[in-house]
Structure formats: structure tokens, C-alpha cells
Image: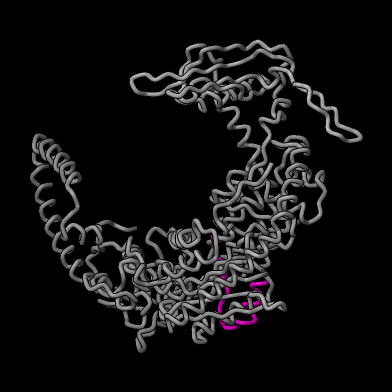
Amino acid sequence: MTMRPSNNIWIRRQQCPCGDWKCYVKYEGDDQTSVSSQLIKNETASTSSSSEAVFTPYVGQIFKSDDDAFEYYSNFARKNGFSIRKARSTESQNLGIYRRDFVCYRSGFNQPRKKANVEHPRDRKSVRCGCDAKLYLTKEIVDGVTQWYVSQFSNVHNHELLEDDQVRLLPAYRKIQEADQERILLLSKAGFPVNRIVKVLELEKGVQPGQLPFIEKDVRNFVRTCKKTVQENDALLTEKRENDTLELLEACKAMAERDGNFVYDYTTDENNKVENISWSYGDSVRAYTVYGDVVTFDTTYRSITYGLLLGVWFGIDNHGKPIFFGCVLLQDESSNSFAWALQTFLRFMRGRHPQTILTDIDSSLRDAIARELPNSEHVICLWHVLSKLSSWFSLPLGLQYEDFKAEFDMLCHLEGIEEFEHQWNLLVARFGLASDKHIALLFSYRTSWPLSYIRGYFLARSMTAEFSQSLDAFLKEILGGQTCLQLFFEQVGVAADLKNQSREGVQYTYMKTCLPIEESARSIFTPYAFTALQHEIVLSMQYATTEMANGSYLVRHYKKIDGEYLVIWIPQDEQIHCSCKEFEHSGILCRHCLRVLTVKNYFEIPEKYVLYRWRLESSLVPHVEDQNAQCSSDECAQAFHSLAANLLTESLLTKDRFNHVHRELSRLLDHVREMPLSDEFSLNMAANNITESN
């Protein structure tokens, strides 16, 4: 058995940050690993579900293809204690293959073979015993459509049929999934013997001994085949690594000659081979001057082909989209390598340190950041923590895992540090995780990921689910379908070019309240930032204020669904601060501050609380049509609102009127949907889709 070759040089890092090399991570939602995350459970479920729908085949039964028929017969065979194989096929010049014979795995007899000239030849006993169970297919064409029908079927066996726990061990049903192949190779490389590898996999999957969908012999054959392949190709692979890395360096040099704003740097090892390499673009450096306050350093992917770790620096722009700052390829994941990467990145960005840097959990990276970015806040991306929970806790907790996950999610969003630590202790005690190494790891990083600790750090909304999905999509776009470093370099260059940045998702925004502060904000903020602010403005109307003797305010919801918040108002400097620290966290004023500003008769937000990074004018790629499109959209919206209001008033006078209006509007809507979007007006309106954002 051999590994299925990958069509991409990049894979997710699976090594667990706990430091135990035997521990690895399977990410939730990752297609490459989700197949095997509950391998035994899925295997059983798929078998039972397919078996339930499979009945005994019969002569005349129709199938769309011979493959469908083979799968059907194979499922029937597994349910009934045997396996099948493909036997004879018959072909003609006109029809091609027009007959297929599927037989029991014990059909026929082994022909005697000439024994090899060895001292002790193996005398293998054949399983074939002349069993006559079979299913023969014949192809026919009916009304121009090809189909296959069962021309012969026999379910008479001359041997015992196997029980469920035995039939799964037949060669036809034993397979090693790709994720398990990678794990087996990792354990083998670490020196584990085959029998120990099997035991480790059984423990990791939580199954009884002998209940894996493959046996020790399959693992041994797989390891032997892979070792032989690796030995044969090791020299070629080493040469490919060196050549491709050198080509990447030459590509960087050529780009620097063509573009004076392109920057790169690299290190070499003792043999003068390229070791680490990093680069960035002029557009990226320019973007960093505006959006470099918060940087996400993603180290999710690595290349087995080249033995390199990929690190990519991102920011979040004023439309809430990822913006590329630079990338680095590292030979290892040591603290020194990360330190070099950070030093190089800062040099590219002309020495400006970010306010906050977001990363995954990694002790080496944490040490490097503490050394190279002592004045920057280090935050662990919450989605990196949540993506590991299933790998860490689903097996030991079993049926309790879903309850644990729900409580853990609530814990992440608690506002008080004391409350977090109290609830953490209760969570650990309730689920019996006091000695769990991953719980200890998370607690050791507690100052970097729960909201209660980082609520005062500026993140510019980089921890929202929306941005995390955009970032993941961006990464998959630049990493997809690559087979060499040269293609990767070219694809990164396209993504880094600001002219190629998509403006999808930029929406038309309309008023939800009659407050002047909302009208003023709409003309200043980007639609993305305004939507976030507008949400706070709408909610601010549900809060009551109580003025205190010192001029501060206590603000709380009229239904008292959350606690009180203290808003400090300093009129001399137009300063406003809330105990929720939302502005310090996102750069968007909170509902509590907005409520106080309304009480103070403010008709627009004070200038100091309109950050440049969220303004329309901070866009790096100017769009002249924005204001015209907004005005055009305003006029259309006003006209429709007026017409709809009159129509509603008239239609509610009688039931007949209402039914007529409803029928005609439905017909009109269907007609409009069928109209082509071809003229300039419709294209402009499509870019400014009139939709309500929450």
C-alpha cells in the first residue's frame, strides 16, 4: 500500500504545541483531516447505512454503470460475510466492454506456480476453493442511454461465511486512510516498531485492540513500501529542494531589479545553501503604514516536500478584509528562526512595531516575540484555540465533549479576570481535567487568549469570525494547487497587488435611526466600520443613564440583561471612556459611550474617536464612483420606500385589494429576477447591494 500523492506542496501543521512529539492536532472543519477524525465511527456508520439499503441482487436488476453495480454487490457481500473481486470482462469493437463478471473472493482455484530458486520457498495456502457465487453484468443501450443489467446471479457458497468482526479483516475491506498514513510515517521515523505504532493508533482513536480498519501486517507492508520509495527518491528530492529554493531566490532578485519597492532577505547554512527567505512588496509596505497597528502572523501551513514552515503576515483593512504584508519560509520552528523572521519583517516595514500581534500557540514564537517586539501585545487567535479542542478533548471526554465545548466557549467571553479564573477552576473540576496537559497549556497562555485578559488590547476586529473566515479563504487562494515554490511566489505576488483586491461585500448602508450622529458617521466610515458602529447606535437606545456626582455616568440596559458600565466623561478635552473597553479593543465606540454622547446632545462623534484606519479616505485604492453610487442608491431607496408605503396603505383597505397587490407583486418580482444585468446602472447597483447588515 502506498500513499496517495498530494497535488499541493502545502499542508496544515499537525504537531501539537504541547511539546509532546507523539501528540498531533486534527483541525475541525479541515477536509483533509476530518475524514479520519472519527475513523472508526465513520467506518461503521457508512457500512451500516449502505448495508441497510442493500437487498439481494436479482436477474434483470438495472444499474447506471458497472461501477455502481460493483459497489452495490460489494456492500451486499460485506453484509453477508464475504468479499468479491472482478473476474472476466468481454469487449467488442462497437460496444466496447459489454460484459462484466464479479465473483466471490474464493471463486476458482489457484494455478500452481513455478517455485522461485530459493532455499526455503514460502508455501502459501490459497483461499480459493471453487466457490460459484457470482454476479454477471451485461451492457445495453436503451433510447440512446447506456445501462447495465444483471444477466446471471448466484448466492450459493461452498464455504463458511464470516461474522461481522471477521469480514472487516478481509483484504478488500482493509484500508489505511491518508491521515493515518502520515501518522504512521511520523511514528516510524521516530523509531516506533510496527506493533507499538498499532497500539498508539488504537489509543488515539479510543478503540479496543484489533478494532482498527487495518491490521498490523498492513502497517508493516505500508512502512516497508514507503521506506523503499523514500530511499529511492531521497537524492532526487534533496536536489529538487535545493534547485527550487535557488530558483525562488533568483526570482526575488529579478523582482527587486524590476521593482525598486520590492524587498527580500535570506540566510544560508554552512554549505552556502538557502536556509530562510522572506520578502514583501511596495504595496504591502504602503498598506502597513495605515493598517500596521494590528498584525496577524499565520504559521498554519508547512511543506513536507521542501521541509519549510510558511509564515504569512496579514493586516485588516478598513473594509474588514485581509491585506497581505509579507511572508517567510523557515527551515525550522526554533526561537532563533522566528526571531530572524520578525527582525526581517520589521526592517521591511521601516522599523515600525505593531500595537498587537496575533499568532497561534507556539512557545518558540512566543519567546521570539517577547524578545523582538517587547512593546507589542501578543494575542493568541481564539479560532486557533477553538480549532484544537476536538483533537484535545473529544476522545477523553466522550459524550461530555459537547457540554464542555459549550461551557468553554462561554468562558472565553467572560469580561472579568476573577470570574474567568473562578469559572475555569469549576470547568476543570467538573470534567476531571486537572491533570490534563492541554488544559495546563491553555492556562499557561491565559493572559493571551480569553477576552477577560485581552479586552484592553487593540485588535481592530481581527478576532471576529467573519475575519477569520476571510483570512482562511485568502490563505487557501494563495496556497491552492501549487507544485513548486516558483508558482507559490507568483501567486503571492498577485495576491499582494492592491489592484487585484476584490471589493466584494462592500454594501450600501442606510439609516436605521433618526439620530444625527448616525447620519454623520455614515459619510465618514467605510460601510464595514459603519455597520459595526450602527449596530452599537441602535442598541444604545435601549440603555438608561444615571449621572454621578463627579460627572461620570452609570449605563445599563433597561431590562437589566447585563451589568452596569461606568462611562467617564471629560468635557474639557471631549474624552469619553467606558469600562467595557470596546473602543480600546476595536476602535469603534461602544453603545454605552454613544448613549452618553446622545444625552450630551452630540450630533457627531468627536474627531479623536473616528480612527483614520476606519475612514473612507484611508482606502489605499481610491474608488471615484463610491460617492456617486451612494447618492444614486439613496435616491432609489427613497423612491422605493415612498412607493411601498403608499402601496401598503392602499392595499390594506380591503382583502381583495391586498390579494391583488400580493399576486401582482409576486409576478413582478419573478419578471425582474429574469431580466439580464447588462446596463451600467444595474452593475453599479449590484456593487452597492441594498441589504440590511446586522
Give the camera-side residue of 542 and 251: 251
Identify the residue at horizontal 14%, vertical 59% (top origin): 636
Give the camera-side residue of 140 and 443: 140
Residue 170: x percent and y percent? Answer: 71, 28
Give the camera-side residue of 453 and 460: 460
Identify the residue at horizontal 37%, vertical 23% (top origin): 145
Identify the residue at horizontal 55%, vertical 25% (top origin): 70
User: Where 586 sits versus 169, above or below?
Assistant: below
198 in magenta: no
Give the camera-side residue of 87 and 505: 87
Q: Which residues are magenta?
A: 363-383
Residue 238: x percent and y percent? Answer: 68, 64
Identify the residue at horizontal 54%, vertical 74% (top origin): 357
Q: In this rendering, does residue 397 appear at all?
A: no
Give the number of marks.
0
User: Where 433 sits versus 602, above or below?
Assistant: above
Position of 693 with respect to 390 (left or right) is left
